[in-house]
């Protein structure tokens, strides 16, 4: 007896897309719980409801070509298990005392990551993915580098990882700007700087 049934196939996509990450938004993991968000009942792995409980999220703008995400699938035939390891890699240019403090705080805080890609969803809006929704993500590795030559990058490389029972989810398409969906409520502010 099969546990699940496939529902569709996939053809070759005729459109070209852009890779990379435009923005990473951090939400403190404890600011909302699993009952404060939900998947769309007709689109599995699309989130259409989030109650932010009057909390803020923090937007980090990514330089072009330096940020990426990965969601690694790990299965065990012997044990009958499968899990997902979401990873967010970001680089921030220039070493500053303000960034030093924020990175220290990020290292002490379990977060959820909302990642706005350079990929268009077909409605002239960017695709936004949610990572670490069930168990959160942690800043587990990184470096602070000065570079050696004048042309070297001076700044931070940070890697956030998680461990999830389901793959990363898409956020329902926004109306005019990210997080303005009718199902996304009580967002106090998107802190941009």
Image (cartoon, rainbow, N blue to C red):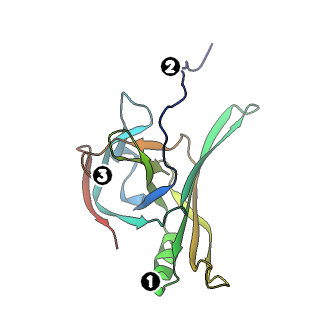
Residue 94 placed where, x, y %?
Answer: 51, 81
Q: Which residue is mark 3?
A: 179
Q: Which residue is mark 2?
A: 7
Tell which circle, 3 or 1, labels the residue nearer the N-terminal end.
1
Tell which circle, 3 or 2, labels the residue nearer the N-terminal end.
2
Q: Are marks 3 and 1 in contact (CB under 8 Å)?
A: no
Distance CA(mark 2)–CA(mark 1): 49 Å
60 lies above or below 121: below
Residue 147 placed where, x, y %?
Answer: 64, 82
Foreground: 3 or 153?
153
Element carrying mark 2? loop
Residue 80 placed where, x, y %?
Answer: 69, 31
User: Which residue is pictured at 55% across the width and 63% down the height?
Assistant: 66
Element carrying mark 3? loop
User: Which residue is pictured at 61% across the width and 80% down the height?
Assistant: 151
Residue 104 placed where, x, y %?
Answer: 52, 77
- 19 left or right of 177 in image: right
Q: Which residue is mark 1?
A: 98
User: Which residue is pictured at 43% across the width and 32% down the height?
Assistant: 44
- 105 left or right of 181 in image: right
Foreground: 67 or 136?
67
Q: Quadrant of the image for the N terminus? A: top right
């Amino acid at each position: 007896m099969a546990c699940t049934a496939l529902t569709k196939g996939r053809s070759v996509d005729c459109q070209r897309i852009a890779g990379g990450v435009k923005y990473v938004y951090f939400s403190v993991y404890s600011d909302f719980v699993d009952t404060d968000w939900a998947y769309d009942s007709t689109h599995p792995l699309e989130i259409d409801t989030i109650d932010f409980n009057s909390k803020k999220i923090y937007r980090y703008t990514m330089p072009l070509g330096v940020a990426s995400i990965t969601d690694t699938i790990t299965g065990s035939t012997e044990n009958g298990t499968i899990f997902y390891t979401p990873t967010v890699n970001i680089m921030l240019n220039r070493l500053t005392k303000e960034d030093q403090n924020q990175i220290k705080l990020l290292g002490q805080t379990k977060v959820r990551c909302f990642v706005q890609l350079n990929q268009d969803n077909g409605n002239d809006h960017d695709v936004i993915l949610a990572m670490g929704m069930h168990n959160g993500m942690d800043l587990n590795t990184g470096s602070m580098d000065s570079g050696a030559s004048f042309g070297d990058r001076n700044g931070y490389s940070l890697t956030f990882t998680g461990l999830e029972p389901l793959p990363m989810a898409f956020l329902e398409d926004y109306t005019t700007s990210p997080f303005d969906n009718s199902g996304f409520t009580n967002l106090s502010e998107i802190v941009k700087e």
